[in-house]
Amino acid sequence: MKAYKIDEKIIRYTFGKPVNTDAVVVSGKEIDKKEIPYVNINCKENLLITYKMDDSDIVYGLGQNQRGINKRGGIYESFCSDDPNHTPNKKSLYGAHNFIIVEGREKFGMFIDYPGKVKFDIGFTHKENLEISLDDNNVHVYIIEGENSKAIVKSFLNIIGRGYVPPKWAFGYQQCRWSYEDNNEIEEVANKFIENNIPCDTIYLDIDYMERYKDFTVSDKAFPDFSNFVKKMKDKGFRLIPIIDAGVKIEEGYEVYEEGIKNNYFCTDENGKPFVAAVWPGKVHFPDFLNKDTRLWFGLKYKTLVDCGIEGFWNDMNEPAIFYTERGIKEAIDKAKESEGKNLDIDTFFGLMDTFRNVNNNDEDYKAMYHNMDGKRLNHYDVHNLYGYNMTRSAAEGFEHIDENKRFLMFSRSSYIGMHRYSGIWTGDNHSWWDHILLNLKMMPSLSMCGLLYSGADTGGFSEDANSQLLIRWNQFSMFTPLYRNHAAKGTRRQEPYAFEEETKDILKNMIEIRYSLIPYIYSEYMKAILNRDMYFMPLSFVYGDAMSKRVENQLLLGDSLMVAPVYEENSLGRYVYLPEDMLLWKARRYDERSYEVMKKGHAYIDVPLEEAPIFIRKNKMLVLGNPAKNVDSMDNSSVHVIAFVEHRATYTLYDDDGLTKEFKEGKYSEIEIVIEKKDEDFEVTIENFGNEEIKTIKFEIIDMSGNVIEKTVEV
Amino acid sequence: MKAYKIDEKIIRYTFGKPVNTDAVVVSGKEIDKKEIPYVNINCKENLLITYKMDDSDIVYGLGQNQRGINKRGGIYESFCSDDPNHTPNKKSLYGAHNFIIVEGREKFGMFIDYPGKVKFDIGFTHKENLEISLDDNNVHVYIIEGENSKAIVKSFLNIIGRGYVPPKWAFGYQQCRWSYEDNNEIEEVANKFIENNIPCDTIYLDIDYMERYKDFTVSDKAFPDFSNFVKKMKDKGFRLIPIIDAGVKIEEGYEVYEEGIKNNYFCTDENGKPFVAAVWPGKVHFPDFLNKDTRLWFGLKYKTLVDCGIEGFWNDMNEPAIFYTERGIKEAIDKAKESEGKNLDIDTFFGLMDTFRNVNNNDEDYKAMYHNMDGKRLNHYDVHNLYGYNMTRSAAEGFEHIDENKRFLMFSRSSYIGMHRYSGIWTGDNHSWWDHILLNLKMMPSLSMCGLLYSGADTGGFSEDANSQLLIRWNQFSMFTPLYRNHAAKGTRRQEPYAFEEETKDILKNMIEIRYSLIPYIYSEYMKAILNRDMYFMPLSFVYGDAMSKRVENQLLLGDSLMVAPVYEENSLGRYVYLPEDMLLWKARRYDERSYEVMKKGHAYIDVPLEEAPIFIRKNKMLVLGNPAKNVDSMDNSSVHVIAFVEHRATYTLYDDDGLTKEFKEGKYSEIEIVIEKKDEDFEVTIENFGNEEIKTIKFEIIDMSGNVIEKTVEV
């Protein structure tokens, strides 16, 4: 074991010779340290980390995962998995985020930087035992100290690098479906949004836009003049966002395939031949994204579509998902043939069924695939969790070459710690299940802990049919997530906001407009979190120290000023909410309709009619609201609104920038500092403008602790 | 259409010539009535019932099903299904309970007496539309009037006949696992309960006790002297409860098979030959339980085991579940062979996968199976939902012949309305998922509405591994259900109360002891519900008329005096609870440890540590508590406790009987009438005993509205 001081709060303990994952961007200096604090680490053949938890210890972390914000009680396995059935027993989802925080008797964070399978038993087998294990003795373990969980996250985010910043329009509402089949259908969708005056920034191209699922192709039949169509749609106000899949179709004459073969860019099998698997296009090879030459090559392929006017993408199937391989399907078919005409006993029968059930995403296939990383041949199984991450890194590296100052929208299905520098994620193929709204909510702060701020769920649910109520309630949460996208699978009921009853459409329009009005705040909080290495969504306990805040699993803090507490149960017309301090409840039905209630610290039951999204403004905090428009580009925020809930003094820094370039990195951004201070019976408002050229007027509604509303208009 | 007056509140509308399901035991008289109230019914080719719902309408019912107590928002399909994966999208579970109540603008109940597939769209497709449809025009529709939902249920229970009464010992704790393999393992389990002083009444024999899964056989190897072992175990205090499956193994020399063949007792195929399917024993025939001769024959077979000392059974696999048929497996294998060596396109690949996935419980197989019911050949698909019901009726009819005055424990997996006269149900193969505790809770009142009072879930979850916390919290609900059984599947973690940490064992022991102390009340409420055609579990709204009570989906009323509100979320140390009136909270940690809190009407957040079960006693109501023992037979209730929460006056009728015979039907039961009345600063207790010979002393703890505890001891 070697120890490296990464910074004042973080020491890395290195066992053996781990694969370099590039998760952490600070390498640190070797120090002389034999003792590891907090935990017991045994790393001879395998790594085993143990920790004895107190009854009151909370364990945060693990990013995209099942169960609660508090991860106690579960077994988790980091092994990026394309499993659409997110039932509570699933141990892996699409991402691998081996970062946890223990908060209780001791407070520390831990990041297990290992790209293969890692198992976390967090008090499942024995309620007091935290055990982390993996089948290798080459691994980095980072121990992160801090005075509380928030500080520990900040330190962690500090060493994994600044997060991805999407264009500002990516904070608008987005509409997807697998698939809008051709330009006619897309235009129809766009027109529906226009006719119904529902704001929308993007429409997605799922796999069917391609020619036979070949990456970087566009079906001529579906899109006879793609570039012009992209332009036409942009003129209408919609950006088109195509999907890119990991597998490259094996097809003579297909440029991507042929270049990949010629330059040995594909993952290989045991014999050094390109590894063959089947996914959407049928037989494919997988680009070897762990090889930096492959990354650059593939990343530059996005230019094909960028040249058509495309400004954003989503990377899919990059766990990588495998539908089948020759090996797997042969094994299954052989087993079927063996069974033919036999009087199958039940074990043989279930064996046969299991063989077919296990054809997908089979470990045997992952073990038969190889990478070439910096000249070293690595078995895929051992570095599995790096694949999607590096596919998306490839795109980001490509974008840097294509237009180094332009922000592209990009999010990925699979991820690993560090990928947040290159893109966001969506939370994968969920279901139109009520439970999945709450799962969505619980995942968000855990993703923020890993820097994956640009994130959100398939609103309304991907698989299965949604009903109108589910869609409304889900929107009432997603309207707060940075990535706000409605998406549904082939064969399911239409799920666009206008696809239901008139009343549903009106409610959804109102919710989407409220989202647009929230963008000045959401964008400001997002950017400040990126620049300051903070979280966007936080558990209540990260800010409030009381015992009850530690228990709350169905409310979140969003940035500096807001608490969100959506309704996520069918037929509920209200919910319980815990207020760690006095807050102002805005019963938001329309962006410009204000109905407030001062909520006292403690527990409350609030009525939440279907048409209402409860928005809580914290004490001595404020919310800046802009003016909805058909899309983000069209928003006119020369005059904005502020809702403030003030006892003594509230301050807010409103960040803004051009929303399109990376110049914010050079400090090219504006800030408006707003101070509201109670003076006798009135409030004094002070505004300092550092470079904001858009906002001219701010209309204040200042609510005091008794609910009195004081209105003021101030010129900036 | 013909109309029949069943009673003052119920009219049956008969379309065509429906199959007689024997669901309803009152036939009624034909009346002249052309108009059907409340709903629109169209029954030409198919039946379509429509009703326009108000926003505030609630729809109760559908027995064993997914979603809420309020069924609005879902699509449901009555088609008894062996699908262990109870995810929210499942439209059918094991039972078919086509009884609903609409409560709102109008109040009425409806029972669709049809034994095939029935679809209920309760505001899913359009939020206001209730649509019930089925593919036939031979059907009875019962319309039930009543002043409220409770009255409607009572009327319905009145026409479907008195419910099943298990022996009193069936209200004890029960332990199951698939499977305790032999007499040694069972004795080991029994000894563990004894060593740990954990009460337990029964231990279950899952499928492996049989000789190659043959009904009514016992493996000689596992149980070399079964009768003696049954006796030995009973002497230790445990009754053994064997499983009986629907399918009869095809095996020359096996008596049940040979008799069935000889007498044409089996369901047939298109050619009139016995229908062949494969389940646990491999190839089987299904007894034709719709044929009354078959029922009697099969029912008497239970005698084989009764003669060994067995006093209870559970009937399984009686949807009937089909693992595969020759047809299905051949189709799948043929498809696999066709695919051999081919470059499968994705549609072909998924088609192949689906073929294997759909081998189980395939409609084609159900459509190829036939019954002989009263000399009429019926296609199984059209009467599918009667199968499990009639298997269990067969057992009950057999028991009547074996020992007409003895109560046998009996519950079934599959069921239809009417089966409650013969047995209870358990809620099938659930999972060790937190969600399934709540699903369990929500199902219970809906089952009570169908008369299926003796019911409960596989506590701790059948599939997947449980952790100790889940098991504790689940017990804290199941301790209130009439059937209180812990069960887990092969391959899962051990789930007996002693299988976890010492602390968990202690908590579970305490909870099980509390359950035993509750038995006088639980049994009394159960029996009064049976005799008075009432429910055992009720939604709050069935008793309280306020708006909030209509929303509550996570609390239940249990009989006359109690409200239960368990914790069902991981790591929760408390929960919100709604009190429709002032109640007394007993924070139950041990049966003999009393810590009370007077809870005021309204909303509250209560702390609920892991070791505590919250029990709410309603205002002016009382709870009678007995004394736990190793099993029900051993309970000494010569002295019982009463906890009463009294403002002015509380009355309670404590029912009891011999617990073993059916003589209660002839009025052979005892009642103790207890009246507590406030007199100045004191309470006056009056007791009238109608035949109870066990209880000599009642120790009262009377809590007044301020929480003062007045103790009294009264001789009976």
Image (cartoon, coloured by chain):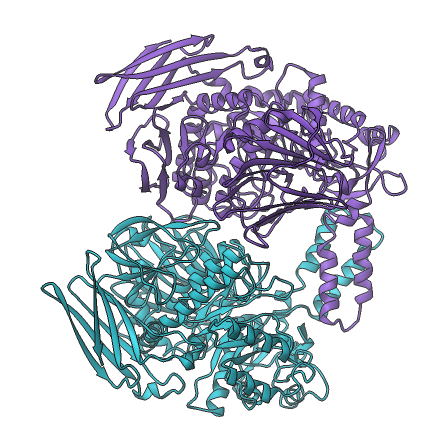
Chain colours: A purple, B cyan
Q: Residue furthest left?
A: B680
Please state, as top left, top right, bottom left or bottom right, where the C terminus of chain A lies in the image.
top left
The image shows residue A235, relative to residue A282, as above or below, that is above
Is A544 placed left or right of A150 in the picture?
left
**Residue at point 83%, 30% (across, down):** A265
Q: Position of residue A339 (x, y in %)?
A: 79, 67
Image position of A273 (left or right of A597): right
Farthest residue toward the right? A271
Q: Residue at x 53, y 39 (%)?
A: A106
State the image coordinates of residue B368 (x, y, percent, origin top left).
Answer: 64, 72
Residue A96 x/y as whole percent:
65, 39
Q: Is residue A247 above or below residue B144?
A: above
Q: Nearer the viewer, residue A23 or A101?
A: A101
Q: Nearer the viewer, residue A152 or A710?
A: A152
Position of residue A699 in the picture relative to residue B677 (left or right): right
B473 relative position to B204: left or right: left
In which quadrant of the rendered image does the N terminus of chain A lie?
top right
Residue A360 in view of the camera: yes
The part of the image, by quadrant, that contains residue B105 is bottom left
Relative to A311, say whether B294 is above or below: below
Confirm whether residue B166 shows in the render.
no
Looking at the rendered structure, the number of numbered marks drawn on it comes to: 0
Residue B453 position, x and y percent, is 40, 71
Q: Observer-nearest residue: A238 or B45?
A: A238
